[in-house]
Image: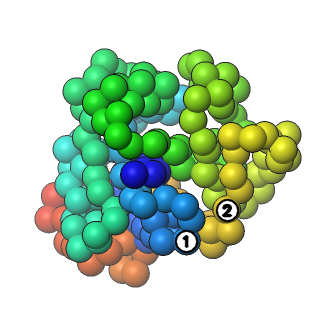
Amino acid sequence: MKVGLFFGSFNPVHSGHLIIAGYMANFTLLDQVWFVVSPHNPLKTKSGLANMYDRLEMVRLATEESTNIRVSDIEFRLPQPSYTIDTLTHLREKYPEHEFHLIMGSDNLASLKKWKNAELILRDYKLMVYPRPGYSAAEFAEHPSVTFTQTPLMELSATFIRNAIHEGKSVRFFVPDKVLEFIESKSLYR
């Protein structure tokens, strides 16, 4: 099975993430998409990061009715901070029957050279890239491991959602109803 791995903090998961995952699971060669919730991205600060179990639960709530989108907490059991290459190696050993593809935005592709063992990622895995406003990854246009998709362009960000909640604004329609209920019940991002 071809599985797309969509790594992220998902702080919180929002409609943009779900549209990207839905596109990848239904309009590309992928059979499934797994949201891989990262406890802590080594290239990001921890401040403002909701508890990893709360973020995992929000992704579960957002995807529970999907048949081809799943949630993974694999990085919760690996050394932190989590490095993508280490998670990929672990998943490949644990699920040798799957062919793993990395789902990433063109913003992440543009900074891929900063990642641990980026050359191994490009050598050993396929990358499914969705567009992000203001980011060009032209240097990878001809790379055999990189596929640029026609995923709808998303300008929605988790930072926007967190700031809106903090300011007391409604984020209804920006996040699934069950996720919004969870955020409100835990008073997250206030």
The residue pinned by badge 2 equals: 149
Front residue (pair 83, 146):
146
Q: In which quarter of the image is residue 112?
A: top right
Q: Badge 1 local density, few (<14 within 10 Å), some, or many (20+)?
A: few
Front residue (pair 158, 146):
146
The spot of residue 36 in percent (x, y) is: 36, 44
At 69% from the left edge and 34% from the top edge, which residue is drawn? 111
**Dot 1 lies on which element?**
helix
Q: Tell me if I can see residue 32 in this picture.
A: yes
Left-right relation of 130 to 160: right
**Dot 2 lies on which element?**
loop
Q: In this view, does 7 lie above or below 176?
A: above
Q: Quadrant of residue 110?
A: top right
At 28% from the left edge and 45% from the top edge, which residue is drawn? 72
Left-right relation of 110 to 183: right
Front residue (pair 91, 153):
91
Left-right relation of 146 to 125: right
Q: In this view, does 19 lie above or below 35?
A: below
Q: In this view, does 23 lie above or below 87?
A: below
Three-letter code, disc 1? Phe
Q: State if disc 2 and disc 1 touch (CB < 8 Å).
A: yes
The residue pinned by badge 1 equals: 27
